[in-house]
Image (tube, helix red, strand yellow):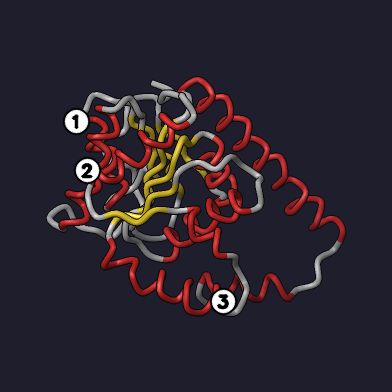
Amino acid sequence: MTQEDRKIKEKLQTKTWNEIKTNDSWAIFKIMAEFVEGYERLSKIGPCVSIFGSARTKPDHPYYKLAEEVAFKLTQNGFGVITGGGPGIMEAGNKGAHRGKGVSVGLNIELPFEQHDNPWIDQGKSLDFDYFFVRKVMFVKYSQGFIVMPGGFGTMDELFEAITLIQTNKIGRFPIVLVGKKFWGGLLDWIKNTLLEEGNISEKDLNLFRVVDTADEAVEHLNNFYAKYQLKPNF
């Protein structure tokens, strides 16, 4: 029986009260511990710009090089960088921040494949999580903006989490920048031609994010946002 099969069978099994107390209830304390450590560690680091993107992007790919350039330019404009701490676009983000001598943070998560710490995270600024939802809270709570590079399901999850929280006024309207017009084009067409046409979003919701092609455009959008509110990056 595979691990996936066991997980499905466990969900369908009736649990005794003692099993619930032993397994489910005690998990709450583990979740609390991750929140406490995350808040304590990241509050000392301060807000940064979160960079999302695929863990599968190779170092010779143009998107990897673009993410590294975006992160480098962010540090040159006073921003620190938070990534998921793994390979691919995350590694590129941390590498660019490190090259720019800026703050480079990694929020790593244990996965059965593709995830491991990259070597470009600042010493003492790497955190490990077991729970995706705790990790996402840290991304959002300590972000001054979101750079979304091409990625897969995880990247889409993080993107729409940020959009939803801003749309519903649960967090401030921080800038969201999607990098790569060709990559995002099909999704944006679907959002406009299906979600908007069906009345599932409003026209103004399309202004919650900006789509760009270059590192300069991405950083310029963040700078313009903070200039509008007469604010400066945290670093």
Q: Amino acid at mark 2?
A: Glu
Q: x%, y% of residue 98? A: 24, 30
Instruction: Locate residue 136 relative to residue 17 in the image: left or right.
Output: left
How many C-alpha atoms fall within 10 Å of the one at disc 2: few (<14), some, or many (≥20)? many
- Give the residue at mark 2: 68
Residue most toward the right? 17
Q: Residue at x 61, y 50 (%)?
A: 165
For residue 125, which quarter of the picture? top left
Of residues 62 and 14, the one nearer the viewer is 62
- Residue annotated with mark 1: 99
Total number of numbered discs in the rendering: 3
- Residue 67 against residue 77 in the figure, above or below: below
- What is the secondary structure assignment of the residue under circle 3? helix
Image disc number at residue 138: none
The CA span between labels 2 and 3 is 39 Å
Q: Which mark is residue 5?
A: 3
Q: Position of residue 232 (x, y in %)?
A: 42, 23
Q: Nearer the viewer, residue 29 or 47?
A: 47
Compare marks 3 and 1 and give the one earlier in the sequence. Answer: 3
Few, some or many residues within 10 Å of mark 3 (<14, 14–19, 20+): few
Residues marked 1 and 2 touching at CB (< 8 Å): yes
**Residue type highlighted by circle 1:** Arg
